Every structure is written in C-alpha cells, then in structure tokens.
Image: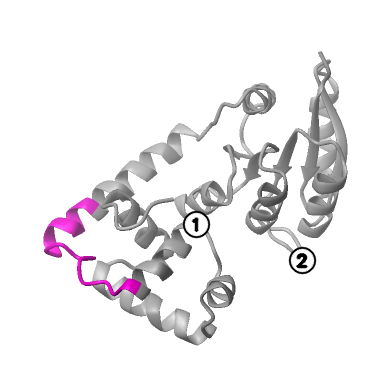
Amino acid sequence: MSPIKVMIADDHALVREGIIKILSLEDDIQVVGEAGDGQEAVKIALEKDVDIALLDVNMPYTDGIEACRIIKKEKPRLGVIALTIHDQEEYLFEFIKAGAQAYLLKDISPGQLVKTIRGVAQGDSYIPPKLIASVFQEINRLSAKQQSSRGAGTDLTPREIEVLQHVARGDSNRLIAKKLFISEKTVKNHLYRIFQKLNVEDRTQATLYALKNKIVEL
C-alpha cells in the first residue's frame, strides 16, 4: 500500500521541522511538501500528489481557512486537517465550513497527530472533546435565544435568506457580492438586518441558528 502523502503549512519553520521529524518515523506516512504561507500551501496542494494537508490558521498572504476553501474546491477528496493554537469555536466552525475534516490543537501528542492523519486518510473526522463541549454550549445558547425571539427568522426577506445561505457556505462578503451582483456595502447592510432579526451577534451564530432552524441548508 502506498504511503499517505502529507503537506505541512505553517509560518514557523521550527514547527514544520518538528512535524516532519515526527512523521518521518512512520512507515505509512510521507511528507511531500512544506509551506510557510497560505499561497504556497495552495500551490503545493494543487500541483503535487497530496492526500492530506496540515494547515495552520494564521499564515501570511492567505490564511489557513481560505487556503482550505480553495484546496477543497479544486481537490474535494484531499483531506484537510487544521493544526492550530486557537481553541475558539469560531475558528472550528469556519474551518468546517471551508471543508476541513479535522481540527487539532498544537498541544496534542505526536501519537494523536499520526492517528488523526491516518483516520482522515480513511475518511474519518476529528474534533477535540474540549471544542465539542463549546459547540453544544453555543447551540444550546442559540436555542434559548430562539425561544425568546418568538420565531426569529420567519420575517427574513428572500434576499436576506439568499445572503444567509451564502454565509452558511462560508462565502466572504466580497464573494457574496460578486455572486449576487450587489455591492459589498449592500451585503453588509443585509447582514446587519439578518443579525438583528435572528438576535445573533456574528456570522457563526447566524449560521448555527439558520442551520438548526432549517432556514437554510448546506
């Protein structure tokens, strides 16, 4: 069986070298490329034979979330694993919407990293238990808001629902404006009214609420 081909993208050379040393000990994993920024990560992932891309969140030029989105659009079968110091659920949600199969924090053990790479290569997913708890807390909080907002979301206009659909897919304001043939300012105005009507504070909360209440579908 051919080895799992992995690409590593992180703007810290020391981190990349450490991961390479860990993976070099595994007979069934082969590092085929490394990148110090998001643009280079996309280039390697699309040009080389890569099975798994390890992406940091904060990288120069193109961040890990946008790099994931681009990679998955061109190579949907390529597995993406976020490897980051950020344990806030909003980063997790954005990476998932961009197409990532796993989200790892940098304080994991080498064994967990290897196990996750093998799992994603087989089609599995992984979210740290610490973040799963946060996700459920957020969903429960939004459920409580739903009960107090008397069916918020039912008065969204067709255009607002359309904008919300694109938000749920992870599209940026610029991309939404381009797809809907409107200005970015108009998109921002729509989002402001959507947040008010749904009684939420940001895009992540709006997406969770909309998906939970079947206002939009992915």
Nearer the camera: disc 1 or disc 2 = 1
> Residue 178 bears which disc, if any?
none
Q: Position of residue 80 (x, y in %)?
A: 66, 40
The answer to whether residue 202 of the structure is visible from this angle is no
Q: What residue is pinned by disc 1?
A: 169
**Quarter of the picture holding the N terminus:** top right
What are the residue bounds of the magenta stretch?
143-158
Three-letter residue code for mark 2: Tyr
When asked about the image quadrant of residue 137, the answer is: top left
The answer to whether residue 166 of the structure is visible from this angle is yes
| 155 drawn magenta | yes
Asked if 158 appears above or below 86 in the picture, the reply is: below
Three-letter residue code for mark 1: Arg
Q: Position of residue 66 (x, y in %)?
A: 65, 58
The secondary structure type at the circle numbered 1 is: loop
When asked about the image quadrant of residue 203, the answer is: bottom left
Crowd rating for badge 1 (residues with CA inside 10 Å; few <14, some 14–19, many 20+): some
Residue for point 54% across, 77% down: 177
Residue for point 67% across, 54% down: 64
Q: Earlier in the sequence, mark 1 or mark 2?
A: 2
> Residue 61 bears which disc, if any?
2
The secondary structure type at the circle numbered 2 is: loop
